[in-house]
Amino acid sequence: MRVREAGKVCEGLWLLGMAESCVYLLQGNRGWMLISGGMAYIVPQVLEQMSRFGLEPEAVRSLLILHAHFDHVGIVPYFKRNWPEMEVLASARAWELLRTPKVIQTINSFSRAVAERMGQSEVFQRFDLDWAEDITGRAVGEGDCLDLGNIRVQILETPGHSSCSITAWVPELGALFASDGGGIPFKETVITSGNSNYTQFQRNLERLKELPARYICADHYGYVCGEEALGFMARAAEMARRKRELMEEVYGRTLDIDEAARELTRAFYEEHPDYLLTPEIFQGVFRQMVRRVAGEMSLSPPHPPGAGIAPRNQC
């Protein structure tokens, strides 16, 4: 079952934001944590929902960024500037990117472009949402355990969707937060996006599907629970395999990365015209994926996926 409405997921876990951009609130008895940073324009909805559900922002002690793409860090500047004691956590690679002027410029320009696409441009006039170098925090990585008291957040490094992607696993709740590295539950399908390294992306899906997840907490389009959650990562792995075959077919026919990306983007938006990203942004995503896949097509087949299936961290 897929749930896209903000509200209580289970005891100690809340979904906040909008259907297309989600953040989660974990309530531990030693502090609360926001997981993922969503898109910038959802700040008003997050604040209203927290007020409606009786969740106080000042009780949030930390905010965990799962990767540094613009649509996953948007609320961070507002929350960090208004509650400076809140600790922001991300991978070491994410912090490297988030301190780079060109990356910061891209985050801010893409955030505004998508807000305009979604009819939310005025939010930037009401709230301080732009990224800048004043946003700092601490690096976390594979093997780290973030102790919230009665619940623990285990960190897995899962690069592939981006070079800086991490996954959070909360065994007490059976909740998995893989961000876009675990597939996007759009409508009734699963969209897979191994932007930076498609082969590693596929290997991560094989690793994650072995976890006994009862809740797949996606950053876009809500969470998956019930029977569907148990098989979601296996389905994502299969969809990733099919997309790879499609990219190989289109590139093999065109022998041109840019033309292949354009063709794949056109086909995607013919099927999904209301997807949240602009076609221009998504074409860039396809260009990255096709370039990586094309570079491997002339090489020997990659090693079988699934190495290191279980999370190596213990806490």
Image: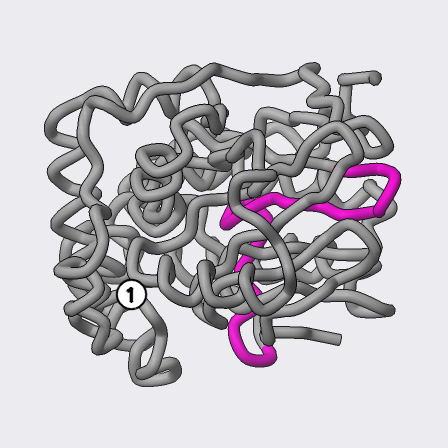
Which residue corresponds to mark 1? Answer: 277
- Tell me if residue 15 can be seen: yes
Is 92 on the left or on the right of 283, as rendered?
right
Q: Is residue 182 magenta?
A: yes
Q: Is residue 61 magenta?
A: no
- Tell me if residue 293 can be seen: no
Residue 154 % position (x, y): 72, 27
Q: Is residue 282 above or below residue 152?
A: below
* Residue occupying the point 51% across, 34% down: 63
Quadrant assignment for the N terminus: bottom right
Q: Residues within 10 Å of mark 1 (few under 14, many from 20)?
A: some
Residue 23 % position (x, y): 52, 53
* Among the 4 quarters of the image, the one containing residue 214: bottom right
Q: Nearer the viewer, residue 159 or 299?
A: 159
* Residue occupying the point 26% across, 75% down: 118
Q: Secondary structure at mark 1?
A: loop
Quadrant assignment for the C terminus: top right
Which residues lie in the magenta part? Answer: 170-188
Q: Amino acid at mark 1?
A: Leu
* Among the 4 quarters of the image, the one containing residue 149: top right
Report how many numbered discs are placed on residues in the image. 1
Is 204 on the left or on the right of 256, as rendered?
right
* Residue occupying the point 16% across, 70% down: 116
